[in-house]
Amino acid sequence: MSSRVSRRSLLVSAAALAVSAGPLATVARAAAKTPKVLVIGLDGALLSRVKDAAAPHLGALMAAGLTAPSSIYANPLAPTLSGPGWSTLITGVWPDRHQVKDNAFTGARFDLYPDFLTRVETAKPALATYAVSSWAPITDTVFSTKVDTRVSTPAAEYDTGTTARAVARLRDADPDAMFVHLDNIDHAGHSHGAASAQYLDAVRTADAQVGEIVAAVKGRPRYAAEDWLIMVTADHGHTDAGGHGGSTLQERQTFLIATGPTLSAGSVRHDVKMPDVAASALAHLGIAIDPAWNLDGRPVQQPAPDDFDALRGQLGTRVDETGIPASVVGFTHAPPAGWSVDNSAMGTGGVTEWRGWSFTTDEFWTQSQRDQNRECNVRARNVFAVADGDEWSDKSLTGTFDSTLVSPAFPVTGGRAATLAYTTHYRHESPQKGEVLVSYDDGAPVTVKTYTADAPSRAEALTLQVPAGATRARVRFRYTGGNNWYWVIDGVKISQV
């Protein structure tokens, strides 16, 4: 919502991978237990302020399970508003798929990308689904009529009424999947700013309400025979002065706190993204995720780190960049084991951080320069590789940007088709070019894909015809240009069926 309009005022106007849940069957969990899901949304909550508030109930959930700080998009993908945020969390896809770009839900494609409770009802109609929200559009618009019960809490009751209704449902009924939305943290952010005492008070109040809801879960007569996945998340952050919708890292902040049978106590992860909430709920309930759904989320119970993620502990702070806070750790030129960077044709000078292919994070890279679509690199996770000719050129240099990222040798079987998969985000300006080349048994590299036009964040899957007799395949990503834009690569793998 607008940084100038409070949520309470809008409440009044509102009233007039390809992944399946199969691998979870191998997890050691009591077969007799009934899987259940509870998702609690804290609108506009910042994880940093949750920690500042020393919130005991949220702190207990963090101690008992997973804490995953994360970040979202900005324009032109979508502004950091509640409509796009909750739609992403609830459907499991980014705004370029669900098409919600504002709080009016104009152009929403919930017919193609329905909410996770609707997917539950479609796959397992016998399960009981329930959603209650202090912000009516969530339960009036995002969740469909297929959900067994949708409650938009009257504005006069606000979060107190939402909490009471959630507690009553857990006490008096037998829900299998629940979504609960609490709004007052966002209201305090708009009215007083995220740096205010009032915002901290709102966090503490929401924490107490989360405590009531979790206590209701644990107080259920059959709790010992139930297998609960509890997830707490937020749709966006807030500025210190108050408001959101822009591209600052603080506005783009979100998080997931989760407890469940496969999540390690006190664990912290950086590979979790907003759409994972919906995917995790479906997986926990034993619902196979159909590749045809095109979900962007993947279950948190099934982490899939790539080679670049192993670099997180080796990342350093800024060198030449001035927009990135000095305390932010987030880049290295040292590739992970098996990878290499060929800078033999690379120009000299330029901004150190981006001299040739670098390995970085969203928190670091997006702060090098905001509002140039770096914030829209949503499908890369944790640490990723970037070639950024635009930022490299912000300091005196000679020559041009010409750097090649070289993969390890992937095992292949000759004479059969293989799939080269990776995530990319490419912004183009001539004469810049991105080339994907593949070599077999370290023979001559052959170009299999060339980027000469914008390719916003997406997963690529290129079919390779492996020559007869070949046993190894190596991939090269060559970026050439100058004061142009950038290319992101992540999650590289070659597979054969």
Image (tube, grey):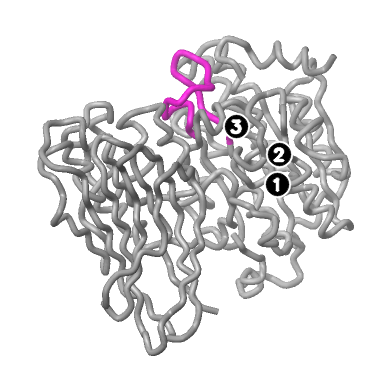
Above or below, comparing residue 164 to residue 448 in the picture: above
**Cα separation between marks 2 and 3:** 10 Å
Residue range of the region highlighted in magenta in the rendering: 234-253
Residue on which the image places disc 2: 213
Residue on which disc 3 sits: 207
x and y, in percent, of residue 345 in the image: 15, 53
Residue wearing tag 1 = 38
Compared with 488, 249 (above or below) is above
Question: Are circles 3 and 1 on residues that touch, CB within 8 Å?
Answer: no
Mark before the other along the chain sequence, 1 or 2? 1
Could you tell me residue 161's position as x and y percent? 78, 25
Q: Residues within 10 Å of mark 3 (few under 14, many from 20)?
A: many
Left or right: 453, with 474 as reference point: right
**Amino acid type of the residue tagged 2 in the rendering:** Ile
Task: State the image coordinates of residue 139 (x, y, percent, origin top left).
Answer: 79, 33
Q: Name the secondary structure under disc 3.
A: helix
Q: How many marks?
A: 3
Viewer-side residue, 389 vs 248: 389
Which of labels 3 and 1 is toward the front? 1
Q: Is residue 269 visible?
A: no
Q: Secondary structure at mark 2?
A: helix
Hey, which quadrant is residue 351 in on the image? Answer: top left
Whether label 1 touches label 2, CB < 8 Å: yes
The 10 Å Cα crowd at callout 1, few under 14, some 14 to 19, many 20 or more, is many
Residue 352, x across and y down, in percent: 16, 40
